[in-house]
Image (spheres, rainbow, N blue to C red):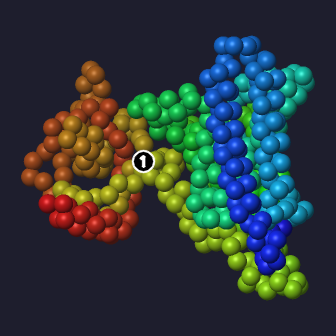
Amino acid sequence: MATALSWNTTASAEHRAPTRASEAWFGSVVVVAGLALGYWLTNYALPGRMSADMQVYVARPLFWGALGLISFAFWRRTPDRPTADRTILWLAALAGGFNIAALICAGVLLGFGHSPYSRGLFQVTQNIWYLATFIFALEMSRAYLLTVWGRWNSFLAFLLVSLIVGAVWFAPGQFESAANQDRGLQVFGRTFMPGASESVMASFLASLGGPVPAFIYHLSMEAFRWVSPILPQLEWQVAAFVGTLAPTLAMLIVRDVYGSGQRAVAGTAAMPEAEASEGRGVSPLALLAGSLMVALIWINTGVFGFQPFLVSGHSMEPNFTPGDVVFARDIDPSSLKVGDIIRVRRPQGSVMHRIIEMKQTRDGMVFVTKGDNNNTADAPITEAQVEGKIVFEVPYVGWAPIAIKNAVGRVLQ
Protein backbone atom coordinates (compact mmCIF):
# COMPACT_ATOMS: atom_id res chain seq x y z
CA MET A 1 0.00 0.00 0.00
CA ALA A 2 1.45 3.35 -0.97
CA THR A 3 2.07 5.64 1.95
CA ALA A 4 1.49 9.37 2.27
CA LEU A 5 4.59 11.51 2.42
CA SER A 6 5.14 13.47 5.62
CA TRP A 7 7.65 16.26 5.96
CA ASN A 8 9.89 16.43 9.03
CA THR A 9 10.53 20.09 9.65
CA THR A 10 13.11 19.66 12.40
CA ALA A 11 16.61 20.96 11.97
CA SER A 12 18.09 17.47 12.01
CA ALA A 13 15.85 16.42 9.12
CA GLU A 14 16.96 19.46 7.13
CA HIS A 15 20.60 18.55 7.69
CA ARG A 16 19.95 14.98 6.63
CA ALA A 17 18.34 15.98 3.30
CA PRO A 18 21.62 16.67 1.41
CA THR A 19 23.09 13.47 2.80
CA ARG A 20 20.09 11.47 1.60
CA ALA A 21 20.32 13.05 -1.86
CA SER A 22 24.03 12.22 -2.07
CA GLU A 23 23.37 8.69 -0.93
CA ALA A 24 20.57 8.32 -3.50
CA TRP A 25 22.86 9.37 -6.35
CA PHE A 26 25.67 7.17 -5.08
CA GLY A 27 23.31 4.21 -4.79
CA SER A 28 21.94 4.88 -8.28
CA VAL A 29 25.44 4.85 -9.77
CA VAL A 30 26.31 1.63 -7.97
CA VAL A 31 23.11 -0.14 -9.03
CA VAL A 32 23.25 0.97 -12.67
CA ALA A 33 26.95 0.09 -12.84
CA GLY A 34 26.11 -3.29 -11.34
CA LEU A 35 23.49 -3.95 -13.99
CA ALA A 36 25.96 -2.96 -16.74
CA LEU A 37 28.73 -5.09 -15.22
CA GLY A 38 26.39 -8.05 -14.88
CA TYR A 39 25.37 -7.71 -18.53
CA TRP A 40 29.02 -7.60 -19.60
CA LEU A 41 30.03 -10.56 -17.45
CA THR A 42 27.06 -12.66 -18.52
CA ASN A 43 27.36 -12.05 -22.25
CA TYR A 44 31.03 -11.27 -22.89
CA ALA A 45 33.44 -12.00 -20.04
CA LEU A 46 32.30 -15.39 -18.74
CA PRO A 47 31.49 -17.28 -21.99
CA GLY A 48 34.54 -19.22 -23.12
CA ARG A 49 36.29 -18.94 -19.73
CA MET A 50 34.29 -21.61 -17.93
CA SER A 51 31.76 -24.32 -18.68
CA ALA A 52 28.16 -23.44 -19.43
CA ASP A 53 26.95 -25.08 -16.21
CA MET A 54 29.45 -23.12 -14.11
CA GLN A 55 28.35 -19.90 -15.79
CA VAL A 56 24.61 -20.37 -15.53
CA TYR A 57 24.31 -22.10 -12.18
CA VAL A 58 27.28 -20.76 -10.16
CA ALA A 59 28.96 -17.59 -11.45
CA ARG A 60 25.88 -15.76 -12.67
CA PRO A 61 23.68 -16.51 -9.63
CA LEU A 62 26.48 -15.42 -7.29
CA PHE A 63 26.89 -12.09 -9.06
CA TRP A 64 23.18 -11.39 -9.51
CA GLY A 65 22.47 -12.44 -5.94
CA ALA A 66 25.15 -10.04 -4.69
CA LEU A 67 23.73 -7.19 -6.77
CA GLY A 68 20.26 -7.96 -5.45
CA LEU A 69 21.52 -7.78 -1.85
CA ILE A 70 23.34 -4.49 -2.53
CA SER A 71 20.20 -3.03 -4.08
CA PHE A 72 18.19 -4.32 -1.12
CA ALA A 73 20.56 -2.57 1.29
CA PHE A 74 20.11 0.74 -0.54
CA TRP A 75 16.37 0.14 -0.76
CA ARG A 76 16.08 -0.41 2.99
CA ARG A 77 17.71 2.96 3.63
CA THR A 78 15.20 4.78 1.40
CA PRO A 79 12.72 6.52 3.73
CA ASP A 80 9.77 6.97 1.36
CA ARG A 81 9.72 3.59 -0.35
CA PRO A 82 6.33 1.99 -1.17
CA THR A 83 5.43 -1.18 0.67
CA ALA A 84 3.33 -4.13 -0.45
CA ASP A 85 0.08 -5.24 1.12
CA ARG A 86 -1.75 -8.51 0.56
CA THR A 87 -3.93 -7.03 -2.18
CA ILE A 88 -1.10 -5.97 -4.46
CA LEU A 89 0.69 -9.30 -3.94
CA TRP A 90 -2.40 -11.22 -5.02
CA LEU A 91 -2.90 -8.89 -7.95
CA ALA A 92 0.71 -9.40 -9.05
CA ALA A 93 0.22 -13.16 -9.01
CA LEU A 94 -3.07 -12.82 -10.89
CA ALA A 95 -1.42 -10.54 -13.47
CA GLY A 96 1.22 -13.18 -14.12
CA GLY A 97 -1.50 -15.81 -14.35
CA PHE A 98 -3.44 -13.63 -16.77
CA ASN A 99 -0.43 -13.38 -19.09
CA ILE A 100 0.16 -17.12 -18.91
CA ALA A 101 -3.52 -17.83 -19.57
CA ALA A 102 -3.42 -15.59 -22.65
CA LEU A 103 -0.45 -17.53 -24.01
CA ILE A 104 -2.12 -20.88 -23.27
CA CYS A 105 -5.32 -19.79 -25.01
CA ALA A 106 -3.29 -18.80 -28.06
CA GLY A 107 -1.56 -22.18 -27.91
CA VAL A 108 -4.89 -24.03 -27.73
CA LEU A 109 -6.00 -22.25 -30.89
CA LEU A 110 -2.73 -22.42 -32.82
CA GLY A 111 -0.77 -25.32 -31.35
CA PHE A 112 1.91 -26.25 -28.81
CA GLY A 113 5.48 -27.47 -29.09
CA HIS A 114 7.93 -29.10 -26.70
CA SER A 115 9.94 -26.89 -24.38
CA PRO A 116 13.66 -26.59 -25.25
CA TYR A 117 14.65 -26.73 -21.57
CA SER A 118 15.68 -29.82 -19.60
CA ARG A 119 12.91 -31.69 -17.82
CA GLY A 120 14.76 -33.49 -15.02
CA LEU A 121 14.08 -32.45 -11.42
CA PHE A 122 17.69 -31.44 -10.83
CA GLN A 123 17.83 -29.37 -14.03
CA VAL A 124 14.51 -27.68 -13.26
CA THR A 125 15.76 -26.80 -9.77
CA GLN A 126 18.94 -25.35 -11.25
CA ASN A 127 16.94 -23.27 -13.72
CA ILE A 128 14.67 -21.90 -10.99
CA TRP A 129 17.75 -21.06 -8.90
CA TYR A 130 19.27 -19.08 -11.75
CA LEU A 131 15.99 -17.35 -12.60
CA ALA A 132 15.25 -16.43 -8.98
CA THR A 133 18.64 -14.79 -8.40
CA PHE A 134 18.56 -12.96 -11.73
CA ILE A 135 15.03 -11.65 -11.27
CA PHE A 136 15.77 -10.79 -7.63
CA ALA A 137 18.61 -8.52 -8.80
CA LEU A 138 16.52 -6.94 -11.55
CA GLU A 139 13.48 -6.23 -9.42
CA MET A 140 15.44 -4.94 -6.42
CA SER A 141 17.35 -2.64 -8.79
CA ARG A 142 14.11 -1.57 -10.47
CA ALA A 143 12.36 -0.76 -7.19
CA TYR A 144 15.30 1.22 -5.81
CA LEU A 145 15.87 3.25 -8.98
CA LEU A 146 12.16 3.99 -9.34
CA THR A 147 12.02 5.31 -5.79
CA VAL A 148 15.08 7.55 -5.86
CA TRP A 149 14.72 8.81 -9.43
CA GLY A 150 11.00 9.30 -9.01
CA ARG A 151 11.66 12.08 -6.52
CA TRP A 152 12.84 14.31 -9.36
CA ASN A 153 10.57 13.20 -12.21
CA SER A 154 8.31 10.19 -11.77
CA PHE A 155 7.37 9.91 -15.46
CA LEU A 156 10.94 9.97 -16.76
CA ALA A 157 12.01 7.63 -13.97
CA PHE A 158 9.33 5.15 -14.98
CA LEU A 159 10.43 5.20 -18.63
CA LEU A 160 14.18 5.08 -17.97
CA VAL A 161 14.01 2.32 -15.38
CA SER A 162 11.73 0.20 -17.57
CA LEU A 163 14.17 0.60 -20.47
CA ILE A 164 17.35 0.00 -18.48
CA VAL A 165 16.15 -3.02 -16.54
CA GLY A 166 14.31 -4.42 -19.56
CA ALA A 167 17.41 -4.14 -21.75
CA VAL A 168 19.46 -6.28 -19.34
CA TRP A 169 17.13 -9.19 -20.10
CA PHE A 170 18.01 -9.31 -23.81
CA ALA A 171 21.15 -11.03 -25.07
CA PRO A 172 23.39 -9.16 -27.56
CA GLY A 173 22.51 -11.67 -30.28
CA GLN A 174 18.89 -10.56 -30.10
CA PHE A 175 19.88 -6.95 -30.76
CA GLU A 176 22.02 -8.08 -33.69
CA SER A 177 19.12 -10.12 -35.10
CA ALA A 178 16.82 -7.12 -34.78
CA ALA A 179 19.25 -5.10 -36.90
CA ASN A 180 18.98 -7.64 -39.71
CA GLN A 181 16.70 -6.22 -42.39
CA ASP A 182 15.02 -9.55 -43.16
CA ARG A 183 14.38 -10.67 -39.58
CA GLY A 184 14.28 -7.33 -37.75
CA LEU A 185 10.52 -6.94 -37.65
CA GLN A 186 10.00 -10.53 -36.51
CA VAL A 187 12.58 -10.27 -33.71
CA PHE A 188 11.20 -6.90 -32.67
CA GLY A 189 7.64 -8.22 -32.57
CA ARG A 190 8.31 -11.62 -31.01
CA THR A 191 10.95 -10.54 -28.48
CA PHE A 192 11.33 -6.84 -27.81
CA MET A 193 7.72 -5.64 -27.70
CA PRO A 194 6.52 -8.36 -25.28
CA GLY A 195 9.66 -7.92 -23.20
CA ALA A 196 9.18 -4.17 -23.04
CA SER A 197 5.51 -4.59 -22.10
CA GLU A 198 6.41 -6.99 -19.28
CA SER A 199 9.10 -4.59 -18.04
CA VAL A 200 6.60 -1.72 -17.98
CA MET A 201 4.13 -3.90 -16.06
CA ALA A 202 6.83 -4.87 -13.55
CA SER A 203 7.72 -1.19 -13.09
CA PHE A 204 4.05 -0.40 -12.53
CA LEU A 205 3.82 -3.06 -9.80
CA ALA A 206 7.09 -1.89 -8.23
CA SER A 207 5.81 1.70 -8.12
CA LEU A 208 2.74 0.49 -6.20
CA GLY A 209 4.24 -2.05 -3.84
CA GLY A 210 8.00 -2.21 -4.17
CA PRO A 211 10.08 -5.16 -5.40
CA VAL A 212 8.01 -8.07 -4.10
CA PRO A 213 4.96 -7.80 -6.41
CA ALA A 214 7.23 -7.13 -9.39
CA PHE A 215 9.30 -10.20 -8.44
CA ILE A 216 6.17 -12.37 -8.18
CA TYR A 217 4.92 -11.21 -11.57
CA HIS A 218 8.25 -11.57 -13.37
CA LEU A 219 9.16 -14.93 -11.83
CA SER A 220 5.75 -16.46 -12.61
CA MET A 221 6.11 -15.53 -16.28
CA GLU A 222 9.64 -16.87 -16.64
CA ALA A 223 8.95 -19.99 -14.58
CA PHE A 224 6.19 -20.88 -17.03
CA ARG A 225 8.57 -20.47 -19.98
CA TRP A 226 11.37 -22.46 -18.35
CA VAL A 227 9.43 -25.17 -16.48
CA SER A 228 6.40 -25.97 -18.61
CA PRO A 229 6.99 -29.11 -20.70
CA ILE A 230 5.06 -27.61 -23.63
CA LEU A 231 4.93 -24.04 -24.87
CA PRO A 232 2.68 -22.27 -27.41
CA GLN A 233 4.07 -22.41 -30.93
CA LEU A 234 2.93 -19.08 -32.33
CA GLU A 235 3.65 -17.12 -35.46
CA TRP A 236 5.65 -14.02 -34.65
CA GLN A 237 2.70 -11.71 -35.31
CA VAL A 238 0.48 -13.58 -32.85
CA ALA A 239 3.28 -13.86 -30.28
CA ALA A 240 3.84 -10.11 -30.58
CA PHE A 241 0.16 -9.29 -30.24
CA VAL A 242 -0.53 -11.55 -27.25
CA GLY A 243 2.77 -10.78 -25.54
CA THR A 244 2.23 -7.05 -25.84
CA LEU A 245 -1.48 -6.72 -25.20
CA ALA A 246 -1.74 -9.12 -22.23
CA PRO A 247 0.57 -7.10 -19.91
CA THR A 248 -1.17 -3.89 -20.98
CA LEU A 249 -4.60 -5.27 -20.12
CA ALA A 250 -3.24 -6.74 -16.87
CA MET A 251 -1.95 -3.28 -15.95
CA LEU A 252 -5.38 -1.81 -16.61
CA ILE A 253 -7.03 -4.42 -14.38
CA VAL A 254 -4.52 -3.98 -11.54
CA ARG A 255 -4.80 -0.21 -11.72
CA ASP A 256 -8.57 -0.36 -11.57
CA VAL A 257 -8.83 -2.93 -8.77
CA TYR A 258 -5.99 -1.66 -6.60
CA GLY A 259 -6.92 1.97 -7.16
CA SER A 260 -10.48 1.25 -6.02
CA GLY A 261 -9.18 -0.54 -2.95
CA GLN A 262 -6.88 2.34 -2.09
CA ARG A 263 -9.71 4.83 -2.40
CA ALA A 264 -11.78 2.75 -0.03
CA VAL A 265 -8.94 2.71 2.50
CA ALA A 266 -8.30 6.41 2.04
CA GLY A 267 -11.93 7.19 2.69
CA THR A 268 -11.72 5.66 6.18
CA ALA A 269 -8.36 7.16 7.07
CA ALA A 270 -7.43 10.61 8.19
CA MET A 271 -5.81 11.25 4.84
CA PRO A 272 -8.21 12.84 2.31
CA GLU A 273 -9.27 10.67 -0.59
CA ALA A 274 -7.96 13.09 -3.21
CA GLU A 275 -4.56 13.22 -1.53
CA ALA A 276 -4.38 9.44 -1.19
CA SER A 277 -5.10 8.85 -4.85
CA GLU A 278 -2.83 11.63 -6.08
CA GLY A 279 0.10 10.35 -8.12
CA ARG A 280 -1.34 6.85 -8.20
CA GLY A 281 0.08 6.28 -11.68
CA VAL A 282 -1.28 5.99 -15.16
CA SER A 283 -5.00 6.63 -15.44
CA PRO A 284 -7.37 3.90 -16.63
CA LEU A 285 -8.23 5.97 -19.70
CA ALA A 286 -4.55 6.25 -20.61
CA LEU A 287 -4.07 2.52 -20.18
CA LEU A 288 -7.16 1.78 -22.24
CA ALA A 289 -5.86 4.09 -24.94
CA GLY A 290 -2.53 2.28 -24.81
CA SER A 291 -4.28 -1.07 -25.17
CA LEU A 292 -6.20 0.18 -28.19
CA MET A 293 -2.99 1.55 -29.69
CA VAL A 294 -1.34 -1.85 -29.31
CA ALA A 295 -4.30 -3.52 -30.97
CA LEU A 296 -4.24 -1.02 -33.84
CA ILE A 297 -0.51 -1.50 -34.33
CA TRP A 298 -0.88 -5.24 -34.72
CA ILE A 299 -3.95 -4.91 -36.91
CA ASN A 300 -1.77 -2.76 -39.13
CA THR A 301 0.84 -5.53 -39.34
CA GLY A 302 -1.76 -8.02 -40.51
CA VAL A 303 -1.84 -10.15 -37.37
CA PHE A 304 -5.50 -11.08 -37.98
CA GLY A 305 -5.03 -11.87 -41.66
CA PHE A 306 -6.35 -8.43 -42.66
CA GLN A 307 -4.21 -5.40 -43.33
CA PRO A 308 -5.46 -1.81 -43.79
CA PHE A 309 -4.32 0.54 -46.54
CA LEU A 310 -5.08 4.20 -47.13
CA VAL A 311 -6.51 5.16 -50.52
CA SER A 312 -4.68 8.29 -51.69
CA GLY A 313 -5.23 8.22 -55.48
CA HIS A 314 -8.18 8.56 -57.86
CA SER A 315 -7.68 5.48 -60.06
CA MET A 316 -10.50 3.48 -58.40
CA GLU A 317 -13.15 6.21 -58.29
CA PRO A 318 -16.09 6.20 -57.82
CA ASN A 319 -15.84 2.95 -55.80
CA PHE A 320 -12.93 4.13 -53.66
CA THR A 321 -11.98 7.77 -53.10
CA PRO A 322 -9.00 9.42 -51.40
CA GLY A 323 -9.40 9.15 -47.66
CA ASP A 324 -11.03 5.70 -47.66
CA VAL A 325 -9.31 2.90 -45.74
CA VAL A 326 -9.52 -0.52 -47.36
CA PHE A 327 -8.64 -3.90 -45.84
CA ALA A 328 -6.79 -6.53 -47.84
CA ARG A 329 -6.92 -10.23 -46.91
CA ASP A 330 -4.21 -12.76 -47.66
CA ILE A 331 -5.57 -15.15 -50.30
CA ASP A 332 -4.50 -17.97 -52.57
CA PRO A 333 -4.07 -16.32 -56.00
CA SER A 334 -5.61 -19.37 -57.67
CA SER A 335 -8.94 -18.56 -55.98
CA LEU A 336 -9.16 -15.07 -57.52
CA LYS A 337 -11.54 -14.30 -60.36
CA VAL A 338 -12.21 -11.54 -62.87
CA GLY A 339 -13.81 -8.56 -61.13
CA ASP A 340 -11.93 -8.98 -57.83
CA ILE A 341 -10.05 -5.93 -56.56
CA ILE A 342 -6.53 -6.78 -55.47
CA ARG A 343 -3.50 -5.02 -54.06
CA VAL A 344 -0.54 -5.48 -56.38
CA ARG A 345 3.16 -5.00 -55.73
CA ARG A 346 4.92 -3.14 -58.55
CA PRO A 347 8.42 -1.62 -58.87
CA GLN A 348 7.07 1.90 -58.38
CA GLY A 349 4.99 0.88 -55.36
CA SER A 350 1.84 -1.03 -54.46
CA VAL A 351 -1.45 -0.20 -56.18
CA MET A 352 -5.06 -1.37 -55.79
CA HIS A 353 -6.78 -2.24 -59.08
CA ARG A 354 -9.45 -4.58 -60.45
CA ILE A 355 -8.73 -7.83 -62.30
CA ILE A 356 -10.01 -7.61 -65.88
CA GLU A 357 -8.28 -10.66 -67.33
CA MET A 358 -6.64 -13.90 -66.14
CA LYS A 359 -4.39 -16.29 -68.01
CA GLN A 360 -3.01 -19.66 -66.97
CA THR A 361 0.60 -20.11 -68.08
CA ARG A 362 3.23 -22.75 -67.59
CA ASP A 363 4.74 -20.71 -64.75
CA GLY A 364 1.44 -19.98 -63.03
CA MET A 365 -1.43 -17.53 -63.22
CA VAL A 366 -0.95 -14.13 -64.88
CA PHE A 367 -3.32 -11.26 -64.10
CA VAL A 368 -4.17 -8.11 -66.01
CA THR A 369 -5.52 -5.29 -63.84
CA LYS A 370 -6.96 -1.84 -64.45
CA GLY A 371 -8.11 1.07 -62.35
CA ASP A 372 -11.85 1.68 -62.66
CA ASN A 373 -11.11 5.34 -63.44
CA ASN A 374 -8.18 4.64 -65.81
CA ASN A 375 -8.34 4.48 -69.59
CA THR A 376 -5.70 1.79 -70.07
CA ALA A 377 -4.91 -1.54 -68.49
CA ASP A 378 -1.80 -2.18 -66.40
CA ALA A 379 1.10 -4.39 -67.37
CA PRO A 380 0.46 -8.07 -66.56
CA ILE A 381 1.53 -9.36 -63.15
CA THR A 382 2.35 -12.78 -61.70
CA GLU A 383 0.93 -14.54 -58.65
CA ALA A 384 3.96 -13.49 -56.60
CA GLN A 385 3.02 -9.83 -57.00
CA VAL A 386 -0.45 -10.23 -55.48
CA GLU A 387 -0.43 -8.87 -51.91
CA GLY A 388 -4.08 -9.52 -51.08
CA LYS A 389 -7.71 -9.19 -52.04
CA ILE A 390 -9.70 -6.13 -50.96
CA VAL A 391 -12.59 -7.37 -48.83
CA PHE A 392 -14.11 -4.26 -47.23
CA GLU A 393 -13.61 -0.53 -46.74
CA VAL A 394 -14.12 2.17 -44.13
CA PRO A 395 -14.88 5.42 -45.98
CA TYR A 396 -13.48 8.86 -45.18
CA VAL A 397 -11.50 7.98 -42.03
CA GLY A 398 -8.20 8.68 -43.78
CA TRP A 399 -8.96 12.29 -44.65
CA ALA A 400 -6.99 13.62 -41.67
CA PRO A 401 -3.72 11.77 -42.51
CA ILE A 402 -3.98 12.90 -46.14
CA ALA A 403 -4.59 16.52 -45.09
CA ILE A 404 -1.61 16.43 -42.71
CA LYS A 405 0.59 14.87 -45.39
CA ASN A 406 -0.39 17.53 -47.92
CA ALA A 407 0.14 20.33 -45.42
CA VAL A 408 3.61 19.04 -44.52
CA GLY A 409 4.42 18.73 -48.22
CA ARG A 410 3.47 22.36 -48.84
CA VAL A 411 5.59 23.53 -45.92
CA LEU A 412 8.63 21.61 -47.13
CA GLN A 413 8.35 22.85 -50.72
Up/down of 156 relative to 366, above or below? below
Report whether residue 321 is seen. Answer: no
Which residue type does callout 1 highlight?
Arg
Q: Is residue 63 left or right of residue 322?
A: right
Up/down of 164 relative to 381, above or below? below
Say few, some or many: other residues with alpha carbon within 10 Å of mark 1 (under 14 / 14 to 19 / 20 or more): some
The image shows residue 33 at horizontal and vertical percentages of 66, 40
Quarter of the rendering occupied by the C terminus: bottom left
Residue at point 67%, 26% (across, down): 41
The image shows residue 293 at horizontal and vertical percentages of 52, 60
Quarter of the rendering occupied by the N terminus: bottom right
Report whether residue 324 is seen. Answer: yes
**Residue 193 versus residue 231: which sits nearer the camera?**
193
Up/down of 375 relative to 278, above or below? above
Q: Which residue corresponds to mark 1?
A: 329
Query: Which quarter of the figure has residue 261?
Result: bottom right
The image shows residue 2 at horizontal and vertical percentages of 80, 69
**Residue 368 versus residue 110: which sits nearer the camera?**
110
Element under disc 1? strand
Q: Is residue 305 left or right of residue 347?
A: right
The image shows residue 195 at horizontal and vertical percentages of 63, 44
Q: Is residue 57 left or right of residue 246?
A: right
Residue at point 64%, 68% (across, down): 282
Residue at point 53%, 42% (across, down): 189
